[in-house]
Amino acid sequence: MNDCEFIISELQSLSDPAYRQKMLRFGIDNSKALGVSMPKVRALAKQIRKNQALSLELWETGIHEARILATIIGEPKLVNEQQIDRWTNDFTSWDVCDQACGNLFVRTPYFKPKVFEYAKAEKEFVKRTGFVLMAEAAVHLKKEPDETFLEFFQLIEREAWDNRNFVKKAVNWALRQMGKRNARLYYHAITTAENILAQQNKKANWIALDALRELRSKGPKAEPKD
């Protein structure tokens, strides 16, 4: 299972026109999609296993599901900064962006500098990548120190004005996930949301209000140590 053409033929055999149409309802660009559901893509990835060379080949096909598959079978230790930049600039759909961040990018040594670089980017999906990386790090990087996320809160507060759909949803996601990580970060997330509201920017209000609603409904996991 290491031949790119064979993998594409497998994806084609799994395609479903009805599912391809359904993608549009979730705001997914299906112009280069075959219509293969994520469970089927992940099942195929399990058969292939990690294969960095094949990952790069699949990405270059431009096919939606092939690119998602590429993010799953890629090897984080073999990913360089240039690959992250190249793939990020190719993003045209939120789901490919999120899969690349969660499956691959966040597991590389470059995730933190890329957060700071992309969070100020002009392109919508590049900027989204910066905030999705924050959210994915909060979920997956159990050993990452709180200090990393404390720096990220500053970026969230600074960029909350950006009302573009795929940016504001990622900013909100990052704020909520960091706030749910532990009690210390919970209180910083609440403070960040309140600071965003204090900006009196209508474009930023949804990010803060939605995050406050979820975080306050669940409360902190425990009392903070400091």
Image: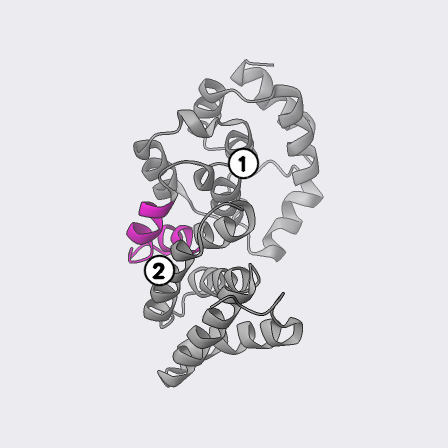
Residue holding disc 1: 68
Residue 95 vs 185, above or below: the answer is: above
Q: Is residue 43 magenta?
A: no
Residue at 59 percent of width and 16 percent of height: 6
Left or right: 43 as drawn, with respect to 213 = right
Q: Can residue 137 be seen?
A: yes
How far across and down, in percent of the image, does residue 130 sit? 38, 52
How far across and down, in percent of the image, does residue 72 sit? 55, 32
How far across and down, in percent of the image, does residue 69 sit? 56, 31
Residue at 46 percent of width and 60 percent of height: 166
Residue 46 vs 186, above or below: the answer is: above
Q: Quadrant of residue 181?
A: bottom right
- Label 1 or label 2, whichever comes before in sequence order: 1
Residue holding disc 2: 151
**Kind of residue at badge 1:** Ile
Residue 68 vs 174, above or below: the answer is: above
Nearer-the-camera pick, 186 or 196: 186
> SS class of the residue under badge 2?
helix
Q: Can residue 37 be seen?
A: no
